[in-house]
């Protein structure tokens, strides 16, 4: 499917605010908007289901309704169908739109999108794009979540942009209901996974789809988990070992081939082999026979987590805390175990929501069930512990600005040098082409030399486009995070449950619950670095706290932000003394 843009009909379509429009949206006649609609695959282009944000028609309807609410005229629309890309540079139509807006910035007030995840996949894309749009006087708005203009709206948008993807809602209510009913009872609603095979239960007049153990492959599954749990195998070497032992994947009625590393990684993560089916974010005891035990599964997960550094898996949540919580009792014993959600009936018929450790079902954890309202209150109280003092925050901002100014000065000289290098490469390229045309050098050798030049040019281009701009984005993200930590508890208490989920996901990788209290937490970057910096600074800086130590600390023993805080005069000193203050590392530490 090729990319496409479409201009609205010549007759102007001016939308006026509907009676039920949000009070936070503007109602200014004369505002103009550009629509941007995108889907990830060609199969979504012409569908017209009503799963919000999937089909182009559904996005267009929502965007037009948003323009009506804002009283904005649609002057142009851009459609990017059937193209998946991880960053905005690879989205051709998006780049066409940005070029068009830059040229016609006086004629545009808004870009309207269905949802920010139709545009941005990471915070860097969001920050750079919004910075450019702000220069042009253009604001990007989404239809599904109405945010006011101003610092509060910017802060919530930062949280929204930190969430890289949203789960697609279920397709087709009737199919979802029937399949969900089977899954909730423990049935398998997908094709049988490796180690199992699909079958039919026709006993006693029934005709039910079930799965049973695959006699040719089931015995390989425990072997795969046991070998990986030793820590001696990578995914590649384990796949090779299983192939040597005779494992072949299924391929219809024909023999399959060796298992790929990607499929093996999914297999080792799958609780299906524990005897669970996963449906809509819940783990349910399945009808099928488990192939491994909980202890072995947890060992494998710990190794995978350690090697990949990945956090919680995103899924659709029915409760805003679901998926963020881990068992504090198991964590204290060195085991990472998620907490599940369960509704239970009380003595008097009421229904109560609880969180409990998944290992309780295997009788491996003695922690108590935690009532949801108690856990919610505990998290509200925990937000008070990640408060960041204003005095420290202001000094870090000042130091980052100084560092950025120094890097900007240095980048001018570097850019001049790199441009001269590019000119030299251009001359070399011209000479090689002339030699080839005159027959003075073999064509194969010319192609090889030209490829080397292209590689060198790409390396120089990367250096020219990196550095200061990425450091500026890192400084912006740190500033936004500091604003978020200015009074996080007050902000959290003011949010709706859905907004709380976004804020939790932006700040925390894991929240550990033990006896209804938050016993520990694992923060996401840059919040983990900021809280570490706060504690290191307060440990030394008497002006920032009571202080346990006096004098200037050894910055080589501190994190990059704390080292920057204690820098005297120029920040060049701590850049040399403290590992991690180079622009690229500072950016990594800040994302």
Image (tube, grey):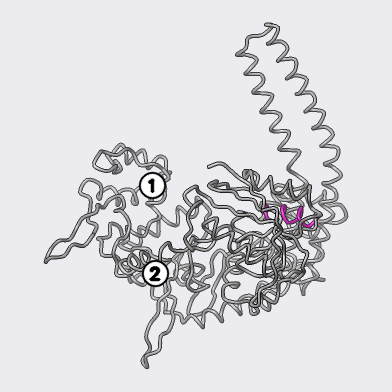
Q: As drawn, which residue projects farthest toward the left?
A: 204
Q: Is 33 placed left or right of 273 in the picture? A: right
Label number found at residue 264: 1
Q: Could you say whether the residue bearing mark 1 is in a helix, strand or loop? A: helix
| Front-lying residue, 305 or 75 | 75
Residue of label 2: 358
Residue 131 among magenta residues: yes
Residue 216 % position (x, y) = 22, 45
Q: Does the image show residue 60? A: yes
In contact (CB < 8 Å): disc 1 and disc 2: no
Q: Describe residue 198's horizontal placement relative to residue 388 as left or right.
A: left
Describe the element under mark 2 as helix, strand or loop.
helix
The residues colored magenta run 124-135
Where residue 252 sits in the image (x, y, percent)?
27, 43
Residue located at (30% from left, 36% from top): 244
Q: Confirm whether the magenta stretch covers residue 388.
A: no
Around disc 2, counting alpha carbons within 10 Å, would you say few (fewer than 14), some (14 to 19), or many (20 or more)?
some
């Amino acid at each position: 499917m090729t990319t496409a843009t479409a201009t609205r009909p010549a007759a102007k379509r001016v939308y006026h605010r509907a009676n039920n429009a949000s009070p936070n949206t503007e109602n200014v006649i004369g505002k103009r908007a550009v629509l941007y609609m995108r889907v990830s695959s060609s199969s979504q282009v012409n569908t017209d289901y009503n799963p919000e944000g999937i089909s182009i028609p559904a996005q267009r309807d929502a965007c037009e309704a948003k323009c009506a609410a804002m009283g904005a005229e649609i002057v142009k629309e851009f459609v990017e169908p059937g193209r998946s890309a991880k960053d905005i540079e690879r989205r051709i139509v998006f780049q066409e739109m940005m070029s068009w807006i830059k040229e016609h910035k006086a004629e545009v007030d808004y870009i309207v999108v269905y949802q920010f995840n139709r545009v941005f996949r990471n915070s860097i894309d969001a920050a750079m794009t919004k910075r450019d749009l702000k220069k042009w006087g253009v604001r990007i708005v989404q239809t599904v979540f109405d945010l006011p203009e101003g610092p509060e709206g910017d802060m919530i948008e930062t949280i929204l942009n930190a969430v890289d993807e949203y789960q697609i809602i279920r397709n087709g209510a009737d199919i979802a209901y029937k399949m969900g009913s089977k899954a909730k009872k423990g049935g398998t609603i997908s094709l049988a996974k490796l180690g199992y095979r699909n079958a039919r239960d026709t006993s006693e007049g029934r005709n039910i789809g079930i799965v049973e153990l695959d006699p040719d492959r089931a015995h390989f599954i425990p072997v795969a988990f046991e070998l990986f749990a030793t820590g001696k195998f990578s995914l590649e070497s384990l796949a090779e070992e299983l192939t040597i032992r005779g494992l072949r994947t299924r391929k219809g009625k024909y023999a399959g081939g060796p298992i790929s590393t990607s499929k093996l990684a999914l297999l080792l993560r799958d609780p299906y082999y524990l005897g669970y089916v996963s449906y809509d974010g819940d783990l349910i005891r399945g009808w099928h026979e488990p192939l491994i035990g909980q202890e072995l599964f947890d060992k494998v997960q710990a190794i995978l987590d350690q090697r990949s550094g990945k956090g919680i898996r995103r899924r659709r949540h029915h409760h805003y805390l679901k998926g963020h919580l881990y068992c504090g009792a198991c964590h204290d014993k060195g085991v990472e175990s998620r907490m599940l959600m369960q509704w239970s009936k009380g003595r008097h018929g009421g229904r109560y929501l609880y969180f409990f450790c998944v290992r309780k079902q295997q009788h491996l954890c003695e922690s108590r069930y935690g009532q949801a309202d108690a856990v919610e209150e505990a998290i509200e109280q925990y937000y008070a512990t990640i408060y960041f003092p204003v005095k420290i925050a202001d000094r870090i901002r000042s130091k980052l600005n100084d560092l950025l100014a120094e890097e900007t000065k240095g980048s001018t000289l570097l850019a001049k040098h790199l441009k001269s290098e590019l000119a030299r490469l251009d001359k070399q390229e011209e000479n090689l082409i002339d030699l080839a045309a005159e027959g003075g050098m073999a064509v194969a050798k010319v192609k090889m030399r030209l490829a080397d030049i292209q590689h060198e040019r790409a390396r120089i281009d990367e250096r020219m486009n990196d550095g200061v701009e990425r450091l500026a984005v890192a400084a912006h993200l740190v500033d936004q995070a500091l604003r978020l930590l200015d009074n996080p508890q007050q902000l959290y208490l003011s949010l709706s449950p859905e907004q709380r989920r976004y804020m939790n996901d932006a700040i925390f990788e894991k929240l550990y619950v033990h006896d209804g209290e938050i016993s520990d937490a694992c923060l996401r970057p840059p919040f983990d670095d900021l809280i570490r910096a706060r504690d290191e600074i307060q440990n030394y800086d008497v002006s920032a706290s009571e202080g346990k130590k006096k004098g200037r600390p050894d910055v080589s023993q501190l994190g990059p932000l704390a080292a920057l805080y204690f820098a005297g005069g120029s920040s060049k000193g701590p850049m040399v003394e403290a590992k991690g203050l180079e622009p690229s590392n500072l950016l990594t530490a800040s994302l």
